């Protein structure tokens, strides 16, 4: 393993990535929890929300940082 130079990453990109990581994985874990509670509709909505959040994150990255 080598060291990775992250000095070129802007603060806004880091914050944006952290927020979307927390949002997507939070929605996924909430969806899994709702599935175990046999609330399938709420679980599916959480999974859909995670997918939509991931797509929005990709669009934002493509528009602002590429």
Image: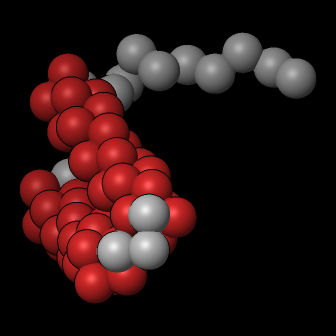
Residue toward you, 26 or 12: 26
Q: Residue at x 55, y 19 (%)?
A: 5
Is residue 56 placed above or below 44 in the rendered structure? above
- Say how the picture is coloured: secondary structure
Q: Nearer the viewer, residue 54 or 48?
A: 48
| Residue 3 versus residue 9 in the image, above or below | above
Q: Is residue 36 left or right of residue 51?
A: right
Count up the numbered dots: 0
Q: Is residue 40 above or below residue 17?
A: below
In the rendered image, is residue 52 in sight? yes
Viewer-proximal residue, 28 or 61? Answer: 28
Which residue occupies the foreground of this view, 60 or 3? 60
**Residue 53 located left or right of residue 21:** left
Picture quarter with the N terminus: top right
Judge left or right: residue 64 versus residue 39.
left
Quadrant occupied by the C terminus: bottom left
Q: Is residue 23 above or below residue 44?
A: above
- Find residue 42 and report its horizontal and vertical position in percent: 25, 74
Q: Residue at x 21, y 28 (%)?
A: 15
Q: What residue occupies the far right of the structure in this picture?
A: 1
Provide residue 36's location: percent of width, then percent of height.
52, 64
Residue 55, quarter of picture:
bottom left
Q: Residue 8 is drawn in which quadrant? A: top left
- Residue drawn at x 47%, y 21% is 6
In the rendering, at what x and y percent does residue 39 appear?
Answer: 34, 74
Q: Percent x, y for residue 34?
A: 38, 64
Q: Is residue 58 visible?
A: no
């Amino acid at each position: 393993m080598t060291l990775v130079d992250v000095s070129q990453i802007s603060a806004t990109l880091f914050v944006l990535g952290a927020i979307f990581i927390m949002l997507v994985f939070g929605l996924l874990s909430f969806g899994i929890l709702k599935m175990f509670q046999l609330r399938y509709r709420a679980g599916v909505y959480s999974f859909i929300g995670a997918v939509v959040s991931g797509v929005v994150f990709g669009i934002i990255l493509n528009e602002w940082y590429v």
